[in-house]
Amino acid sequence: PFSSPSPQRAAAARERRNPGEKMAGAVAYEEQRRRQVEENRRKLDQLNLHHLSAALRDAAVAPRPSPVKSAKRKPRGPPPGDAPPRRSGRVASLPEQPNYRFEDTYADIEKKIRGSRTHSTRTDLIDRVYATEEARTYATDMAEELQAKLDPRHPSFVKPMTQSHVTGGFWLGLPKQFCTKYLPKRDEWITLVDEKGTESDSYYLARKWGLSAQWKAFAINHKLVDGDCLVFERIHQTRFKVHIIRQSSYYK
């Protein structure tokens, strides 16, 4: 016995037998689809949805002004009238700071910066004396002649003065060999005695072989200048007699 054909085969067989039936069905489908599209368009027109979508699109594209930028800022300036400036409680008790305004002159600003500082009355940097080579050599020769006349039991050395010794830094370096042989191995105060017997103390730095503290006072009090020459005569372990040869003696 033969089996019955499947539904797909049966439909294909009918189409082969009647091709006009298939075409009529396609036309009916297209007509129904066209009517449905027109019905949908009519409903959209009634709801005005296309106008609403256009408005939303335009609103999304157009830039919106920032509320922060659009807000008006208050102009900054001094407080009106004689109102005192606002200060936090943390600094309210502190003294008033100087106000450097642009109309102040340079001298006024410098005066405010200096405040109550104390300044030396010595004008050594302005009234510096620059010894000539002849005067410097003469003072050194006279100091060496004086050294040769001293007691040989007292070690001594000759020290010509330069600008760094008598102005500005006021640092007096001593001969290393003399310090190593005759001076203490640690920092210690040394007494300087001038030709009139006046004593002055100066602090000796053993590792730097020089005089630092209070040497400035000795140089100023004895009016030492560039070109002067000193003879240091050791009369005790930490006591020196200082002989001063002035460079100005060359002109006398």
Image (spheres, rainbow, N blue to C red):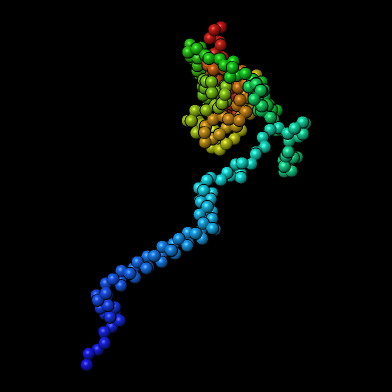
Residue furthest to the top in view is: 252
Q: Residue 240: percent from the left, percent from the top?
A: 59, 26
In depth, the one of 70 and 212 nearer the eye is 70
Residue nearer the viewer, 159 or 196: 159
Lateral position of residue 173 relative to residue 108, left or right:
left
Q: Quadrant of the C terminus?
A: top right
In the rendering, at what x and y percent does residue 87 appear? Answer: 72, 39
Question: Does residue 24 appear anywhere in the picture?
Answer: yes
Q: Residue furthest right?
A: 82
Q: Which of the pair 146/166 is nearer the observer?
A: 166
- The mark tally for this picture is 0
Q: Residue furthest bottom?
A: 1
**Horizontal and vertical percent for residue 62?**
52, 45
Residue at 58 percent of width and 44 percent of height:
66
Q: Is residue 194 left or right of residue 59?
A: right
- Residue located 27% across and 74% down the image: 18
Query: In the image, residue 146 lies at what x, y percent?
Result: 53, 17
Whether residue 233 is visible here, answered yes or no, is no
Residue visible at 51% across and 24% down in the picture: 157
Front position in the image: 166 or 246: 166
**In terms of image quadrants, where is residue 79?**
top right
Name the residue at 54% across, 37% down.
185
The N terminus: image quadrant: bottom left
